[in-house]
Amino acid sequence: MKGWAGWLGLALLTTVGLAGCGSNSTTAVTLTVSPNVATVLLNTSVQFVPTAAGSTNTVDWSVNGVLGGNATVGTIDVSGLYTAPATLPSVGSGVVAQIVSIVNNSAIPGSGATGAVVQLKPGSDFSQFVAGNQITIAGNSVATWNATFPISFAAQLSNGNYGVQIPFQSGSPANGTGGTATIAVGITITAQIENTSAVANATVTLDSGIRVSISPSSFTIGTNETFNFFPTFAVSGTSNQTVIWGVTGLGTIDPNSGLYTAPGATGTATVTATSAVDTAQFATATVTIVTATDPTITSITPSTGALGATSQQVYLSGSSFISTTSVLVNHTPILTGIVSLSSSTLLVVVPDSILSSTQATTPPRLCR
């Protein structure tokens, strides 16, 4: 009996020992999501695919912290299919902030990471310039910075400016000055394995489909002269054609009408037209301010036109042509359709109102 009892005790001890060894064996639970960055048009969808290890539990999906998302930021189903909202989420006041400088390979104190820092002039509402949202830069002196970036950190700076930190940009682009900054709501897709701490994120940039253009993209304007940029822009992808005008460099521009006024000194400027519906969409044009001199005409091509035609393109050759050069035909000023192709070539679209006249047509006359 004692031998049997001893055998049972040995078996019990062995079993306990095996159980102890098994309890020390754990498998790490990990999760990744693909793609981790996506640009999605409004009202369209993109499929996010989770890759999990160490667990077969269900993956929960959320958008900006809302399980399943909502109509404002977009929705996501149990399979990871994200559907963008019908309209861009509102960012409140829609502030357009003025940029002091952009410095690569720098950091805001307390950010904990190095990136690029955008310094904004005080005086604007910076409540939406926060981590998680996106900043769109336009009109900066360095073209590389004129794009949209995620905000990783933001804080008031000791020099009075407001600092917005964005990721480090490879290629070491030069530091930039000037321009404007607007914001858009950042969209974060989060996947989490139920009953675990395994989490993976993906960043979505919403694309409204709106595009803005300015044609031509460069202009020459005389000192102290005015030029109306309104006829030069176009907006596609929306019925709302409203843009907000801005300028960096020399001169001023009316934000609503697009009327630019050149300074008394020569130099350069950049004019920006930003969609009022989607401030991430904009177009720029370069302006060269010169000392204007009286233009001259040496030839007109073609020399004849069709009476009663809807319009006629005429090329003028000469000298000292700039964007503010005026053209008169039959003593009637051509109000639109004048393009300075170069200082020696001017394209003029003569409208039907002049071509329908039976009076003798006089050659075009130029003036400043």
Image (cartoon, grey):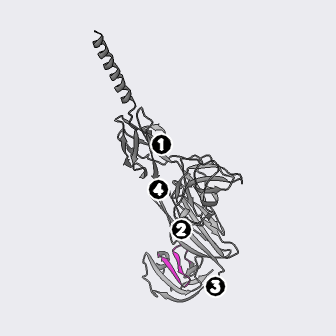
Q: Given the current orientation, which residue lies at the most extreme front position? A: 3
Q: In the rendered view, does 97 fall on the left or right side of 201?
A: right
Q: Given the current orientation, which residue lies at the most extreme top position? A: 1
Q: Which mark is residue 239?
A: 4
Please say if the residues under marks 2 and 1 sit with CB atoms less than 8 Å apart: no
Please say if the residues under marks 1 and 3 sit with CB atoms less than 8 Å apart: no
Q: Secondary structure at mark 2?
A: helix
Question: In terms of sequence position, does the residue under pointer 4 or pointer 3 come before the other?
Answer: 4
Task: Between residue 270 and residue 133, name the one nearer to us.
Answer: 133
Q: Would you say the magenta stretch is mainly helix, strand or loop? A: strand
Question: In terms of sequence position, does the residue under pointer 2 or pointer 3 come before the other?
Answer: 2
Q: Which mark is residue 294?
A: 3
Residue segment shown in magenta: 333-351
Q: Report the amino acid beneath label 2.
A: Pro
Task: Between residue 136 and residue 165, name the one nearer to us.
Answer: 165
**In whole angstroms, how far apart are the C-alphas of marks 4 and 3?**
41 Å
The percent coordinates of residue 73 (x first, y second) are 47, 43
Select label 1 or label 4 by which is in front.
1
**In whole angstroms, how far apart are the C-alphas of marks 2 and 3?**
24 Å
Question: Which residue is disc 1 drawn over?
Answer: 72
Please say if the residues under marks 1 and 4 sit with CB atoms less than 8 Å apart: no
Please say if the residues under marks 2 and 4 sit with CB atoms less than 8 Å apart: no
The percent coordinates of residue 314 (x first, y second) are 48, 82
Select label 2 or label 1 by which is in front.
1
Q: Secondary structure at mark 1?
A: loop
Q: Quadrant of the C terminus?
A: bottom right
